[in-house]
Amino acid sequence: MTVDFVAELTAARMLAIIRGTDTGAAVAAGRTLLASGVRIVEVALTTPGALRAIEAIRSDAPVGSLIGAGTVLTVADVADVAAAGAQFVVTPAVVDSIPEAARRGLPVAAGALTPTEAHTAVGLGASVVKLFPASLGGPAYLKALRDPFPDVPFVAVGGVGLDHLRAYLDAGAIAVGVGGPLVGDAASGGSLEDLRARAQAYVAAAQRRQA
């Protein structure tokens, strides 16, 4: 079944990014995020055992959630994450994985910072442009970038703290992607209780923006 990734992101308003040092902790963090109301979760391939983590998190994920792979760089990476059951891919830059994922029908959030990169990513088949690192220019830069590309769905990723979430959404992002400020050290064995509290705060803030 084809996923309308743009619609799902627009509804959820946020994407959680897991980047840890332990497979089991990454799985536990993913399950905690989903149980706390987060609907879209990305596991970065830099996490040890990331493919196993994607499989495990997706195996008992709630209906309506999406589990994807991040830091997907190569054609081989796309094959690996597709086999693991990833429902979308995320890249940090304009890389070879974008057209390959698009060819396979996997939605792509392609990393880009400049107007040229954003335009190139869309031309290669990206469903969404991941403005990364968003903190470099902040919400004002996102707004300036959207002016010439009003029809491109942007997701702001990189240094998006809870206090900044609304500003990025108000500047025109369809969603924000949050790693460290949300997940903290939970994917490396840190407190899941603390993660639960942060996740609930982020979900509440994202949904409040919709009201």
Image: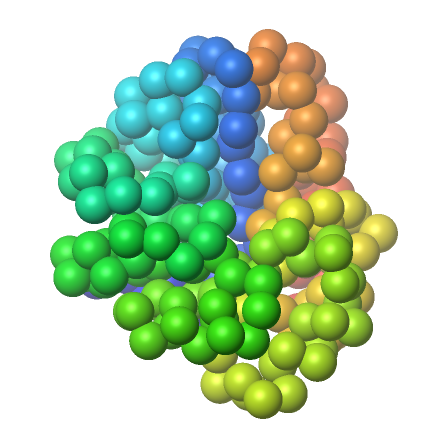
How far across and down, in percent of the image, does residue 192 sit? 64, 19
Label count reads: 0
Q: Is residue 197 above or below residue 146?
A: above
Give left or right: position of 44 versus 37.
Answer: left
Q: Nearer the viewer, residue 32 or 97?
A: 97
Residue at the location (58% across, 63% down)? 113
Q: Nearer the viewer, residue 110 or 15?
A: 110
How far across and down, in percent of the image, does residue 7 sit? 42, 69
Q: Is residue 13 above or below residue 185?
A: below
Outermost residue to the right: 163
Q: Quadrant of the C terminus?
A: bottom right
How far across and down, in percent of the image, does residue 132 sit? 59, 55
Give left or right: position of 24 versus 32.
Answer: left
Residue at the location (73% across, 31% down)? 197
Does residue 211 appear in this view?
A: no
Q: Is residue 115 above or below residue 89?
A: below
Residue at the location (48% across, 68% down)? 117
Residue at the location (55% across, 75% down)? 115
